[in-house]
Image (tube, rainbow, N blue to C red):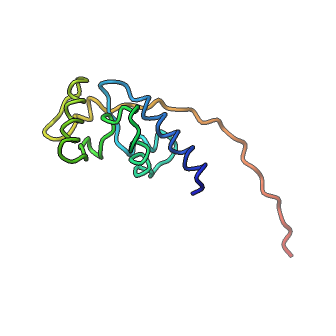
Amino acid sequence: MKPETNDGMLARIRSTIRRIPRGKVATYGDVAYAAGFPGAARQVVWALHGSRELPWQRVLGAGGKILLPAEKGAEQRFLLQSEGVAFIGLRVDMKQHRYAWPRFRRTKRKAQRMPRTRKG
C-alpha cells in the first residue's frame, strides 16, 4: 500500500472513531467496516496506536472483550464504566452499548453495457 493511501485510510478510520459517542462502543471490525474498509481491523489498531486525542477506550475486541493487557485494560474498563457502559463479566454488554452506525444510501448506477462482439 502506498504511504499516501495508508495515511488517507488511517485518517478515515480516526474520523470514524471520533464519531462514537459517550456510553457507546464499537469493535475493531465495526470501525473498519464503518470507515469503508471491511476486514481491516488491524489497521484500526494502528490508527489508535499513538493517537492521544481519540476516544480509544470505546473500541473493543469482538464480542465486547477488552484486549489490552494489565493496567491498560483496567484503565479502559474504568473509563468505560465512568461513561455508564455496563459489563457482563469481562465483556461489555454489546446489546445495550454497541454503537449503531448510520446507514448510508447507495445511489443506483446504471449498469454499463459491454459492447457486443460478433461471433463467427
What is the tally of numbered marks visible in this picture? 0
State the quadrant of the C terminus.
bottom right
- Across and down, in percent, residue 47 comes to 44, 44
| Left or right relative to 64: residue 17 | right
What residue is shown at x 52% (from left), y 43% (from top)? 36
What residue is shown at x 54% (from left), y 32% (from top)? 104
- Across and down, in percent, residue 96 comes to 26, 29
Quadrant in the picture for residue 84: top left
State the quadrant of the N terminus.
bottom right
Q: In this view, does 81 lie above or below 61?
A: above
- Across and down, in percent, residue 51 comes to 41, 38
Depth check, front residue: 5 or 109: 5
Quadrant in the picture for residue 93: top left
Q: Which residue lies furthest to the bottom in this view?
A: 120
What residue is shown at x 39% (from left), y 31% (from top)? 100
| Left or right relative to 63: residue 116 | right
Quadrant in the picture for residue 79: top left
- Across and down, in percent, residue 117 comes to 84, 66
| Left or right relative to 68: residue 101 | right
